[in-house]
Amino acid sequence: MNRLSEIIEALEGFAPKELKEPWDNVGLMVGDRAQKIDKVYVCLDLTTENVREAIDCGADLIVSHHPLIFKPLYSVTEDDPISCMVRAAVKNNISIFSMHTNFDKAEGGTNDLLAHRLGLQHIREYSAAECVDASGTPFSPIGRVGFLPAPVTMEEFLSKVKSTLGCTALKYTGDPFDEVRCVALCSGSGGKEGVYSAFHSGADVYVTADLGHEHARSAYELGLNIIDAGHFETENTICEFLKDLFETNFPDIQFFVSSAKPLYSSFYHLAKATRGWLFFFISLFPFAYKYTKRQVIKC
Ligand SMILES: [Zn+2]
């Protein structure tokens, strides 16, 4: 019989909560540490859809990457989505546990998982000296730096990132013909600070998500290529990782992975997909015509 306290011990053994950023909220959000756990559901985001899916599969515990509760809740009513999810979890006897920046920073966590998926070698953390902004103000290091086995062009690397992470589209700044060997990365939102740590590390390119005009402008001025590969795509590795962790440590627990897709899509992708279906149906037309004709002859 597995108690929630034993599962928490295993998860925190991998990603100690002391690693979290000061602004973050991680750990047990809803639940009872003495609860018996038979079914676990994992997801990146706690959305209404994911909570409903967890209820439908009879989960006792949801493990999410992004915390359900970031800011204090002054009431738990049906008036806002976060409260609704808390109420739904309590009513269905589901505990909720989140591992966020502690998991990003942990050895083997989201950043290491991303680095390995991109095929990087000699993976390392940022040094303290690399984590300073333009004014020399230090900040907390989150991310990794590593090397591709052989140099490629930026265009080839963009293609690799897109196919490896299953991105529908990528945003980037830089020259497609630049040579890429050293890669800096931060899963999820690397922010402006991430641009500086990547630059100071001497990387040829920085892979992260949620980049805006301000980040692109800073990178441009620093001469750093950057790729926005999407928040979901750079972090959803947590689901497969947790599946392996539970199968190894808690083999009698039933495990469910969220079927959620990224929260936003690329219009280009949708347009391309629609075009693809259109060509598919047009290409069927000669066969359909032939088949119909044969039917007519048979009659
Ligand atoms: Zn995130």
Image (tube, rainbow, N blue to C red):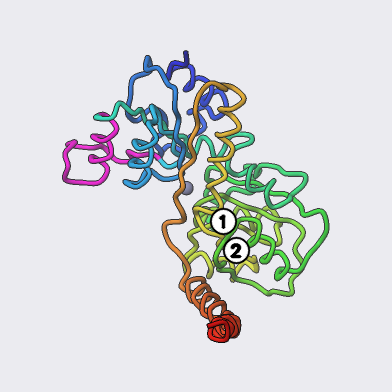
Residue 70 forms part of the magenta stretch: yes
- Which residue in the structure is indicated by mark 1? 208
Badge 1 vs badge 2, beta-carbon distance below 8 Å: yes
The crowd level at tag 1 (other Cα within 10 Å; few <14, some 14-19, many 20+) is many
Image position of 93 with respect to 277: above or below: above
Q: Quarter-wise, where is residue 67 in the image?
A: top left
- In the rendered structure, which amino acid carries the disc numbered 1? Thr
Pinpoint residue 235: horizontal percent, then vertical percent.
53, 48
Residue 26 forms part of the magenta stretch: no
Residue at (74% x, 56% y) in the render = 182
The tag earlier along the polypeptide, 1 or 2, is 1
Image position of 183 with respect to 139: above or below: below
Pinpoint residue 178: horizontal percent, then vertical percent.
74, 71
Q: Secondary structure at mark 2?
A: strand
- In the rendered structure, which amino acid carries the disc numbered 2? Ile
Q: Could you give the CA–CA distance between mark 1 and mark 2, rounded to whole angstroms? A: 6 Å
* Tag count: 2
Q: Quarter-wise, where is residue 196 in the image?
A: bottom right
Residue at (59% x, 58% y) in the render = 166
Within 8 Å of ligand 1, the CB of disc 1? no
- Which residue in the structure is indicated by mark 2? 227
Residue at (48% x, 59% y) in the render = 210
Pinpoint residue 195: horizontal percent, then vertical percent.
57, 58
| Magenta highlight range | 67-90
| Of residues 198 and 149, the one drawn nearer to the viewer in this rendering | 149
